[in-house]
Amino acid sequence: MAKVVCVLYDDPVEGFPNAYARDGLPKLESFPGGQTLPTPKAIDFQPGTLLGSVSGELGLRTFLEGQGHSLVVTSDKDGPDSVFERELVDADIVISQPFWPAYLTAERIAKASKLKLAITAGIGSDHVDLQAAIDRGMTVAEVTYCNSISVSEHVVMMILSLARNYIPSYQWVVKGGWNIADCVARSYDIEGMAIGTVGAGRIGSAVLRRLKPFDVKLHYTDRHRLPEAVEQELAVTFHKTAADMVPVCDVVTINAPLHPETENLFDNAVIAKMKRGAYLVNTARGKICNRDAVARALESGQLAGYAGDVWFPQPPPKDHPWRSMPHHGMTPHISGSSLSAQARYAAGTREILECWFEGRPIREEYLIVAGGKLAGAGAHSYSAGDATRGSEEAARFKT
Ligand code: NAD
């Protein structure tokens, strides 16, 4: 019987909800392109309820305990005295969400001698030292596509919010003001702007599709070129590298995974190549952008705005400069954890667990690492290596 350790974010400060803003979720038939939605044999939760926090337990307890497995759920994940560090030692399976990542560093993997499977309830498995997982022969799997559309909606929202100066304008209303000139002195239409995505996979191409009706000029860079028919349909221009693309863009959105090729990609040099007054939106991973280079570029005016929901580490310390830099539109990591997305990744996590316990293969598109190498979505979108360095700093959030 397996010991499953599941790390989830805390419940709401006012307690676990007993009522919701809406009565249900729209029913989807499939993902764009035809990939099927998660297909567990059953679910023990109500779609549209809070599943990603500790009391939601991803709806897994009845299923796991019914089969004789044990489940430990905690939000206490950072530092040597954390519940996670303690429970990990004899865990067979670890589940965590990128929003509140249980960092599985090489040191932690070394301490967890029974650990065979790390499931990302969501997308993006950079919180696992993938090189250490490869060396150990572990399986790392995620729920590919579960929240890609959720994030693409968030990206469009953030681009419009920055360009139109939405957040400061909202704040004038809350403060009791009617300061139109203060609001509009930094407000622009995106019509006619050039917008480029780094990464045109599931999220990046959904962002391109959603932006097309705004009459903007679309650009992308990716290690895999889109089919010619798609490039023509979207009228999108391909660039070999991010550095080649950014000089022509008014807005850049980052939609590639974090791995050794993309870590620190937006450093001083690449940001300096951007147009003065460009907007940068990063919902991919915090470490793809250099923390201090972003803050400096906002202060100097090289960037007119920066928004996103990804930080490093997570949670970021209280004094992280992205909390206080000018012209930012940061949120905690939420874009992929809408109630709609939670229902899909909770079901996908259960599908992966059912396959694992029954000895059936996990869907190829869910795999990041398997059989001692990158596999499935991992082989397509990642390079091997480690991107967890520095994650210990997450423990500082508590102090
Ligand atoms: P995907 O695998 O469909 O697409 C990723 C694309 O990035 C692929 O086309 C890949 O070729 C490309 N890529 C990889 N390395 C690159 C590089 N060096 N330069 C340019 N392109 C590169 O994945 P997706 O569903 O689109 O998700 C992308 C990433 O977004 C995830 O890995 C994750 O980090 C992040 N994400 C964030 C949230 C959130 O809540 N903020 C939710 C889901 C995913």
Image (cartoon, rainbow, N blue to C red):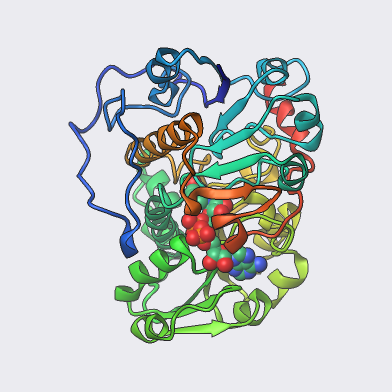
Q: Is residue 1 above or below residue 158?
A: above
Residue at (49% x, 69% y) in the render: 200
Q: In this view, does 94 lie above or below 71?
A: below
Which quarter of the rendering shows the C terminus? top right
Q: In which quarter of the image is residue 96?
A: top right
Q: How many numbered discs, if any?
A: 0
Q: In this view, does 141 lie to the left or right of 77?
A: left
> x%, y% of residue 199?
55, 67
Q: Can residue 349 be seen in this view?
A: yes
- Foreground pick, 270 / 275: 270
Q: Quadrant of residue 58?
A: top left
In the picture as drawn, the residue positioned furthest to the left comes out as 23
Ligand 1 shown in quarter:
bottom right
> x%, y% of residue 398?
68, 22
In the picture as drawn, the residue positioned furthest to the front comes out as 359
Q: Is residue 23 left or right of residue 340?
A: left
> x%, y% of residue 69?
51, 15
> x%, y% of residue 389?
79, 43
Residue at (48% x, 54% y) in the render: 365
- Foreground pick, 73 / 131: 131
Q: Is residue 328 visible?
A: no
Which quarter of the rendering shows the N terminus? top right
Q: In this view, does 288 lie to the left or right of 135?
A: left
Residue at (61% x, 51% y) in the render: 285
